[in-house]
């Protein structure tokens, strides 16, 4: 059976600062997927300087591991040149907030 759920999550950032520490956010990402399914998360960091994408992704992976411990998942960083193909191969597309400039 092909599993066809696709979620788009848009966040202004600071989800870990919520009263629940980000548990509800991670639940929104992982609910509706069976435990047997590896959740493929595509993280879009286009609103941040590209040189900070790696650091941001590593922090988010650690954050997801904290709250999505009962399911398997993988995180890929979106790339402009392959974005359309990456979306097709993901279950969740997560648009992370950017950095404000004065």
Image (spheres, rainbow, N blue to C red):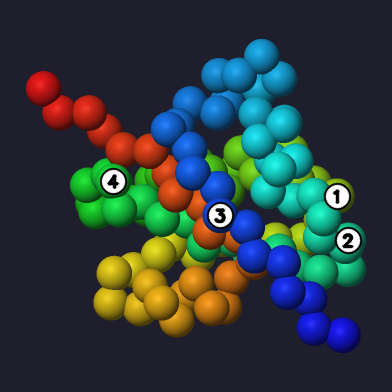
Q: Earlier in the sequence, mark 3 or mark 1?
A: 3
Locate residue 21 relative to residue 15 in the image: left or right.
right
Front residue (pair 21, 52)? 21
Residue visible at 57% across and 26% down in the picture: 16
- What numbered label is drawn on residue 89? none
* Numbered disc in front, either 3 or 1: 3
In this view of the protein, can residue 57 be seen by the observer?
no
Q: Which residue is mark 1?
A: 70
Mark pair 3, 1: CA separation? 21 Å
Q: Earlier in the sequence, mark 2 or mark 3?
A: 3
Residue visible at 27% across and 44% down in the picture: 48
Q: Which residue is mark 3?
A: 8
Locate residue 101 relative to residue 30 in the image: left or right.
left
- What numbered label is drawn on residue 35? 2
- Image coordinates of residue 70 in percent, x first then y, are 85, 50
- Image coordinates of residue 55 in percent, x first then y, are 38, 46
Q: Earlier in the sequence, mark 1 or mark 2?
A: 2
């Amino acid at each position: 059976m092909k599993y066809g759920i696709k979620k788009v999550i848009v966040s202004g950032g600071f989800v870990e600062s919520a009263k629940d520490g980000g548990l509800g956010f991670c639940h929104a990402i992982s609910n509706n997927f069976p435990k047997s399914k590896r959740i493929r998360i595509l993280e879009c960091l286009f609103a941040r300087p590209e040189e900070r994408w790696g650091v941001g992704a590593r922090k988010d992976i650690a954050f997801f591991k904290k709250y999505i411990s009962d399911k398997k998942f993988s995180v890929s960083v979106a790339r402009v040149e392959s974005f359309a193909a990456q979306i097709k191969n993901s279950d969740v597309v997560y648009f992370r907030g950017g950095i404000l400039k004065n």
